[in-house]
Amino acid sequence: LIIAIALALFQQYTGVSTMTFYGPIIYQKAGFEQASNAILLAMLQNFWNILITIVSMMIVDRTGRRPLLLWGVAGMGLSQLLIGSFFFFNLKGFYIVAAMYLCMATYIISLAPLGWLIMSEIFPTRIRARGMAFGSLACWVATGTSIQVLGPLMAYLEKTFGNAAGAFWMYAGVCLLCWLFSYQMVPETKGKTLEAIAEIWLRKERDRNPHLLSS
């Protein structure tokens, strides 16, 4: 349950989903000040997202959930670190566009689908409905709250520090927390039966409480 809720929260609080909502505004701040140009880049980004979604569907059962999650979250964090640095050093234009597209790509092949996929695979059948319900609730609460933050945060940082770099560095920090949590807690579920996944939890519990071996 902790894994399901955490992945649902990280899926939104790592900021990539929120950046999609604010895409045209980010592109305007990146130097494409005409609304038509910013909207065009956001539209092209949506087509890019569809293409990467197809790629994600093709590789998720080949590479496994855990490696794809770890590499993807690392890519998200690196991309947001770059976006923040470009804003900080005033390197606008296609530098930020390229970093945005990279950020979206790594999100779509990792945390975006795997948050839901792993959530659906880790619960035993008897509690799956309730577990998924808690995970879904956490996801939508995180969605509703996260989209309220980025716009005002960017405005505050620009007013206070002259640029919005800190917002993306903050998201990069959340990506680091997500990576550490995933590395420590998320098991590989590729090709495993529900019984095999249940045995993962039982084995972990036995490792923590050796006296259970005798029960």
Image (spheres, rainbow, N blue to C red):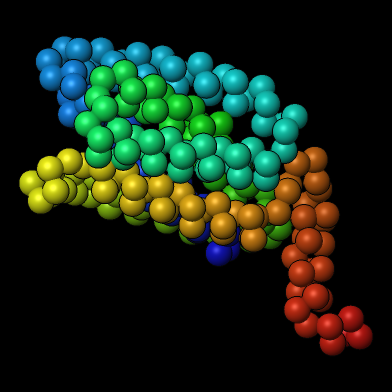
Q: Position of residue 163 (x, y in %)?
A: 17, 41
- The residue positioned 24% from the left and 25% from the top of the image is 92
Going by the picture, which residue comes out furthest to the left?
159
- The residue positioned 46% from the left and 39% from the top of the image is 78
- Asked whether the viewer can see residue 21, the reply is no
Q: Position of residue 177 (x, y in %)?
A: 49, 57
Tell me if residue 107 comes above or below residue 203 in the rendering: above
- Asked whether the viewer can see residue 89, the reply is yes
Position of the C terminus, as image quadrant, is bottom right
**Closer to us: 64 or 201:** 64
Tell me if residue 199 comes above or below residue 170 in the rendering: below
Question: Is 70 left or right of 195, judged from the image as shown?
Answer: left
Q: Position of residue 159 (x, y in %)?
A: 8, 46
Going by the picture, which residue comes out furthest to the right?
214
Count of marks, rendered view: 0
- The residue positioned 59% from the left and 50% from the top of the image is 119
Q: Position of residue 20 (x, y in %)?
A: 32, 31
**Closer to us: 212 or 107:** 107
- The residue positioned 18% from the left and 22% from the top of the image is 31
Question: Is 88 left or right of 124, judged from the image as shown?
Answer: left
Position of the N terminus, as image quadrant, is bottom right
